[in-house]
Image (cartoon, rainbow, N blue to C red):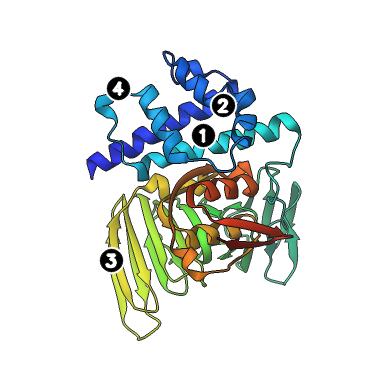
Amino acid sequence: MEEVENKINEARRIARQIEQALSNGDWEQVAPDSPRLREEVGIPARLHENIKRHDSFDTEKALNKFIAATRPARRLSVVYKYAAAVACLVMLGVGYYFYQTTGGTDPRSGLLAQSAYLVLDDGKQVELNRQMQMDYNGLRIINTNEGKVSFQHEKESAHVSPNKLVVPEGTEYTLQLSDGTNVHLNAGSTLVFPSVFGKDARVVELSGEGYFDVTHSGVPFIVKSKSMDVRVLGTTFNMTAYPEDPVVTTTLLTGKVAVTCHSQTDTTTRTTVLTPGLQARFQPREGVLQVDSVDVEEQTAWRRGEFTFEDVDLGSIMTIIGRSFALNVTFDDPELQDIKCFISIQRDKGYEDILKIIHMATGVKFKKDGNEIRVYK
């Protein structure tokens, strides 16, 4: 396991070097003694034209050339599945460079979507598309221009009421609760929360995905979803509970959490306690709870604006991309959903570049019609 992790880290390190080289046009930092590499790949200004001369791009061959030119022979045993991230990032950098220098399609295309909004206890809807401040039932609601809304109150003065933050597909948003807890919600998520927490428990309800940085207190903090509840005192964790997904997960970064799962097939509950680096995966339909060690950086990559998929099936990848860019994805052949892929991509490259990378890594094709994406061979 340690050997595999070392190979992954090495691939990521090389990928970062390549991205930097593409951005500043200097291959010297990647291969200072390799004029052959510059001959084969070309300087960034010529990368797009070089690639256009070929109808298909053999990523494995290109990757082998890169490794041969930059690494000593005794270190050429990098597993292709993991090193493929390098080739993907090279090609992503190529596409991004072309957009920047030719004034082509906006690389952030697809990110524009309906803004997040609050639903207050009286049904009033507050759009969070601008900076604002409002007083409501003893509360002060402040929305910044940095994608964060907070609830502030004076002790014993605020009216306790239920509220809901709705984050549509294609966007993300952060909420600071009245106790100082920060919740970052991913695309297509909602959080129901009280304006002020009671003395016995701090309870919120999640549908979708949220990254929780919970303020420590003697009062338990409980996140409820349809199939999984998480109970903490103060910690950092990521929870994924989209109603349409077959698996619900909680990944712990710091502290300790107690997880309780509810099966859809019977009344039995299943419980476990997580320590940092562990993930609880629950399949509600089957009633199966599994706990595994995971790479928490990969599991929370979305918080850093990244898509990181290590040997993940294309169906799952396209579900995440569809939510993130408010796209409806359909597959011509269900078997295409089972294709595995290993890629690491910055979200702000835009979905068009991301689909190009997936095409290069898997061979599948995409056809766009409005916000509809068709996947075919």
Residue at image position (59%, 38%) is 54
- Percent x, y of residue 129: 75, 52
Question: Could you say whether the residue bearing mark 4 is in a helix, strand or loop?
Answer: loop
State if disc 1 and disc 2 touch (CB < 8 Å): yes
| Mark 3 vs mark 4, CA separation in Å | 46 Å
Label 4 sits on residue: 72
Residue at image position (41%, 70%) is 228
Classify residue 174 as left or right of residue 145: left
Label 1 sits on residue: 90
Going by the numbered disc 3, the residue's amino acid type is Thr
Label 2 sits on residue: 22
The dot on residue 272 is: 3
Residue at image position (67%, 33%) is 98
Q: N-terminal of the two: label 2 or label 4?
A: 2
Q: N-terminal of the two: label 2 or label 3?
A: 2
Q: Quadrant of the C terminus?
A: bottom right
